[in-house]
Amino acid sequence: MSLLSFTAQPLHLTPLPGISLRIRARDLFWLGFFSALLLAVLVWSAASGSYSLSMAQSWQALVSPETEPKRIVRVLWEFRLPRILAAVLCGAALAIAGVMLQSITRNALASPGLIGVEAGASVTLLICVILLPGLIPVFWLPVGAMAGGFAVAGLIWLLSSARGYSPVRLILVGVGITSMLGAFSEMLITYGDIELVESALMWLGGSLHQVSWEQVQVMTAWLVLAGIPAWLGFRQLNLLRLGDKVALSRGVDNRKVIPWLLLLSVALTSAAVATAGTLTFVGLMAPHMARRFCGDRHGVLIPLAGLMGALLVLLGDTLGRTLLAPLQLPAGLVIVLVGAPYFIVLMSRAR
Amino acid sequence: MKRIKQLAALTLAALGLASAVSVSAAEETRTFENRFGKVEVPVKPQCVVSLHDFSLTIQLLELGVRPCGSVARKKLWSDPYFRGVQHRFDLGDTAYVGSHKSPDEEAIAMLEPDLIVGLSYHEQLKDKLSQIAPVVILPTQETPVSEWAAQLADLVGAGDRFRDQQKEYSWVIEEFKRLVPQPENVSVTTLEIYEDNFQLIGRGGLDDVIADMGLGRPVGYQNAKKGINYSLERVGDFDADIIIDTYEPLLDSREETEEFRASPQWQNLFAVKNNQFLYFNRSRYGDSMGGLTGSAYLLLSHIAERDLKTQK
């Protein structure tokens, strides 16, 4: 038996009681490979920054902080680690949300930006910062942005499903509302107080500069609460991609399942946008990159896309804070600059 | 020989005592309080990091304190530019620590500062930066330059120098009022014209100076919202006896706005027709006491020490 035919043989796993998963050895290999790659980038990121730390020092400060000088421990634990973990969590959340939306809408161009969550969160933040400064304390701005994201996604769902759900209608309503909110954002940016606009733009550019441990904890909770149920819905997503009728014939009623799946993807996107700002491209790019390795089998696609998203944002943020240090480039900007050409090459090679 | 040994021991003891005194002065702390709260700060800070170049860095240098680190402006491949600072002061010992909206905490931590000073909008960074050194936020948006500059002088123990600055500034203001007994009858508009819009703004403490001199403002200016962009068509609403625009040499703003200054809307303004349009370098003076005094001298010369036409 050749190695190739062996790696294509499905293995039967039971990761949770009652959940049976058929996974190929090749899928396990890619999951292991990208997990190891993420770990390697994580270690490199922890040792990189304006404050020079060797790999050994970083490792020592990580595993036995009491033996290292306080200043080094502080740089690693208070400045670098929250940022690194937030990048990983936000990237994974956006990628998983992207996979779900692309499957629900059966559209390869769908991304978290499409259902208005990012636009809603951005406009809410711009209103709070530019039009009504001081309305809510700075520390509550992410929560306000999250509420705005949920509200706009809810509105899009109501408008697109009032006469029965249709993926095309969801996309068209989403594009329309997102464009409208985009125009409103542009107006606020153009005519707003320049100082206030600058503050808002830094966040909108997708920056992890001010992430705290509290935000990392909140983001972890959201990823667990919405990410695990999203993964558990992989069978429904597999069937939904085949069309509503096929899904219904196998017991998956799109009218009941899609609102829940949509809610999970909105929760993941809102939490990520509230933590790191708009990193739109990740939700589009990571699922497609993951599909190159495992196809459309969502049981593997969801975790693999999560790993890809985590890698993209972590690389974007680490390069953003080290390339021209001490100048800090927003992660969102670097991801698009570096990721887009790679994505274009990848897609041009796709069959 | 014994004498030499005694002398050496005495010298060493004296040196030790001196360094101990110096260390203890640096480590001695006190409580500083302003509207942003109480902060335990060193009595004599040795390494101060400034989170704004155009105001705090300049004011620190004017007080004779060389910050060990400061934020600056930077284009991707160019050297950092300390706005309003580097044409006046040598910044060889001052490290660049990122931009004023997102300073690099690690670059600041590398300097091991004992005090970090920031503007009102840096309050959101206070918790994080406080892990490096005490962070004092100064009310730069809420109070005039002279008020927060006094707090900064108190922080770094440069009260004497600040009082000298204040004295000089007060003299220029008094001299202006002596020469222009009814300053409220002279109206002034401060603006910044860009390629397709303008803002009502006077940098380098110019608006503070105009207020301190008691100069008037046109009604359109008084009722207008500041800090937002206006269409160039609206420039007539802000016509005044004197119009002050500023240009930024680094941005070629003189050349870029030349076409607008040739337009009929601009040429028909009272100030332009009567050759009372002033065009200053935007980065010549920062928001500092030196900036106030410099701007005050400019207005003294351009308004009080010449014949002026007014609309009243």
Image (cartoon, coloured by chain):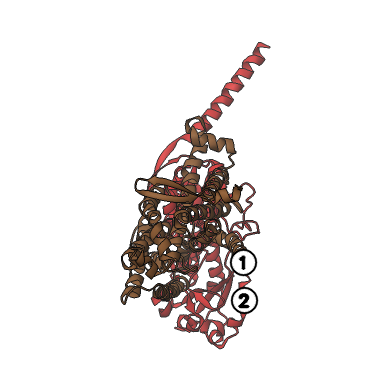
Chain colours: A brown, B red
Q: Distance between the residues labelled 1 and 2?
A: 42 Å
**Disc 1: which chain?**
A
Secondary structure beneath label 2: helix
Is residue A62 toward the left or the right of residue A244 in the image?
right
* Residue name at image x 51 percent, y 35 percent: A61
Q: Position of residue B80 (x, y in %)?
A: 62, 56
Secondary structure state at the residue bearing disc 1: helix
Q: Residue extending furthest top?
A: B2
In the rendered image, is residue B159 in sight? no
Of residues B70 and A303, the one nearer the viewer is A303
Looking at the image, which residue is at 51% across and 81% down? B232
Quarter the C terminus of chain B occupies: bottom left
- Image depth: mark 1 or mark 2 in front: 1
Q: Mark 2 points at which residue?
A: B256
Single out the residue that lies furthest toward the front.
A1
Q: Which amino acid does label 2 sit on?
A: Glu
Q: Which residue type carries mark 1?
A: Ser
- Quadrant that contains the N terminus of chain B: top right
| Picture coordinates of residue A147, whole percent (x, y) | 34, 62
Chain ID at mark 2? B
State whether residue A154 is above or below residue A60: below
Q: In this view, does B219 lie above or below B173?
A: below
Is residue B288 in view? yes
**Count the marks: how many?**
2
Neighbourhood count class around disc 2 (C-alpha, 10 Å): few under 14, some 14–19, many 20 upward = some
Numbered badge on residue A348:
1
